[in-house]
Amino acid sequence: MFTADMIAPCGLDCSLCSMAQKKDDPCPGCNGPAEKKPEFCSSWCGIMRCEKRKDNGYIYCDECPDYPCDDVMEKENRYTSRYPLRESPLENLKMIRERGMDAFLEQERRNWSCRTCGSPVNVHTGVCSGCGTAAGNTE
């Protein structure tokens, strides 16, 4: 699951989302086709609707001169404080820039794979998508 195409423009790792971890018809992540994504991601997310990102062909939000914008900061604040496990889109993009995508994805595998079965842990619940074990970041 931990692949470059699952890294959202804001820096979130879509593989950690419950919708991407569904057994039947999983979400393809922010970079996948809109018709396969939940309505929030395809219609309501300001980052996915961002005209500046689309018009300029920015792959990741940190390419934009307005980075970090309000939409990115909303994600940062929500994912670093609202859910049982912490994920920072800003730190993710920083690591991708500093160390490269391969190193980032390896870190994601280490930090977000269940210690019991190896399946990805859900960032929203802190529970393994494979065996249901409650987990924590391994950092």
Image: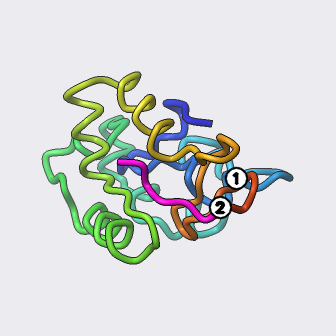
Which region shows up in magenta? 134-139
Q: Nearer the viewer, residue 100 or 39?
A: 100
Does the magenta stretch mainly form a helix, a strand or a loop?
loop
Identify the residue at horizontal 67%, vertical 52% (top origin).
20
Q: Is residue 137 magenta?
A: yes
Q: Is residue 38 above or below residue 92?
A: below
Q: Is residue 81 above or below residue 18?
A: below
Do tag 2 and tag 1 residues touch (Cβ < 8 Å)?
Answer: yes
Q: Element type at marker 1? A: loop
Q: Nearer the viewer, residue 30 or 52?
A: 30
Question: What is the CA distance from the residue labelled 2 to the residue labelled 1?
Answer: 5 Å
Quadrant for residue 76, please give it: bottom left
Identify the residue at horizontal 44%, vertical 65% (top origin).
85
Q: Is residue 118 left or right of residue 83?
A: right
Q: Is residue 88 magenta?
A: no
Q: Position of residue 78 (x, y in %)?
A: 36, 72
Q: Amino acid at mark 2?
A: Ser
Q: Position of residue 92 (x, y in %)?
A: 31, 44
Q: Element type at marker 2? A: loop
Hey, which residue is sitting farthest left in the picture? 65
Identify the residue at horizontal 29%, vertical 71% (top origin).
77
Pointer 1 residue: 21
Q: Is residue 17 above or below residue 56?
A: below
Q: Amino acid at mark 1?
A: Gln
Q: Position of residue 9 (x, y in %)?
A: 39, 45
Res 18 label:
2
Q: Residues within 10 Å of mark 1 (few under 14, many from 20)?
A: many
Q: Nearer the viewer, residue 123 or 69?
A: 123
